Image (cartoon, rainbow, N blue to C red):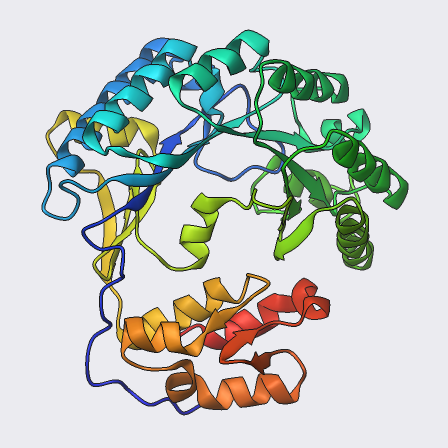
Amino acid sequence: MSRKKPSSPCSRSPTEGGALGLYVHIPFCASKCAYCDFASVPLDDAGGMSAARRYLEALFIEIDRRAVSAEFHGAPARTVYLGGGTPTILPRDWIAELLTRLRHRFPFEADAEISIEANPGTVDEETVATLLAAGINRFSLGVQSFSDDVLHTLGRVHSASEAREAISAARTARCTNLNLDLMFGIPEQSMEEWQDTLAQAADAQPEHVSLYALSVEPGTPLACGISAGDLPPPDDDLAAGMYETAHDMLTHAGFEHYEISNFAREGSQCRHNRIYWADEEYLGLGASSHSFRNGVRWNNCADAEVYTEWIGRGRLPVARAETLSASERVGEMLILGLRRAEGVTSAEIAARCGSSPEELFGEEIAQLRQEGMLLAEDGALRVPREKWLVSNEVLLRFVG
């Protein structure tokens, strides 16, 4: 394939020197799920609350050092996202302490979206109320399914009834911005079960729903169970039908399918994730977190114990950093922006990177349009909704 090589580096993001998104990684969880290959560790295996406290103290040091650095000094936060792991496995006052530290170092914008991931079984009404008082204004609840059989296959430690109790507790505590995570394409999961899960999710009236197709990762207990013949492999055709069923049921229930995997009621799109999809700037704090600032991407070491050790030795925990070329940046803006229903505009990419998508990926764009996989309308490129299920075929064309 031929690509024009730009002569100038990519211009800086318009958020430079200003507001950014903050991601904070809390790696601890109650137990490792059968499908999980994320950077998380069961709290007991990590050394219990004493190890978690050491990690938190290291996190405070990283927050302090980043806040006074040339890249981030004076930068306010427009979104904050506490992810994991399961952040709500920590004591409530520790989470409040973390938010206070962040707010002092990165002043929050008045309308900042402040999210926390939680699992059923780790939150009750008092916990939600305490975290709301501490500044959290969006809860993302890892329900995954309302079927106990499916939850068992996934190795989740909560039950369907505990998921419903957690939703009720959040509402009773007056949480007004609730996301439910759901998973499909699971071995032995039926279409009927999936429809019931979707119906229960819609009946719960959340503001947002995120869907995840199961990915069987090598070395996980789920992958081993499939290899041993204890479980059937996921049925791709059934998973495709589940995705379309979710679109039909959730849009009928009043949700907007605004991104490949995400649905929201009006005014409730996840603002933090939109920072990623717009390829704007963010700072990741904690083990395994990723950052992007001034055209440079970097990621912290993945292991929580190593992270804590490095911080204790006065070393920032950066494992890898790279400066993106203009063509790499354009490719990433396409890969991320095309996940959104509205797609991405050529003018925005050209303004930020000095070259338009058509200049660098003209042949790929023309071929995708011919194949019906990409639309060009009113200066924007977007993937047709009916092609979202196979959108990776589009996005991979823009990988450098």
| Residue 134 or residue 57, whichever sits in front | 134
Counting every numbered tag in the picture gives 0
Vertical relation: 345 (above or below) 69: below
Q: Residue at x 35, y 13 (%)?
A: 94
What percent of the width, then of the height, locates residue 287? 32, 35
Q: Is residue 239 in sight in this rendering? A: yes
Specify whether 121 is left or right of 98. right
Q: Is residue 189 in sight in this rendering? A: no
What percent of the width, then of the height, locates residue 386? 73, 68
Picture quarter with the N terminus: bottom left
Vertical relation: 77 (above or below) 44: below
Q: Residue at x 26, y 28 (%)?
A: 102
Q: Residue at x 18, y 51 (%)?
A: 17
What percent of the width, then of the height, locates residue 59? 25, 26
Vertical relation: 95 (above or below) 5: above
What percent of the width, then of the height, locates residue 180? 64, 34
| Residue 1 or residue 269, whichever sits in front | 269
Residue located farthest toward the top when viewing the structure as drawn: 126
Residue located farthest toward the right when viewing the structure as drawn: 192
Specify whether 249 is left or right of 14. right
| Residue 386 or residue 172, whichever sits in front | 172
Picture quarter with the C terminus: bottom left
Write down the quadrant of residue 64 in the picture: top left
Vertical relation: 47 (above or below) 291: above
Write down the quadrant of residue 236 in the picture: bottom right
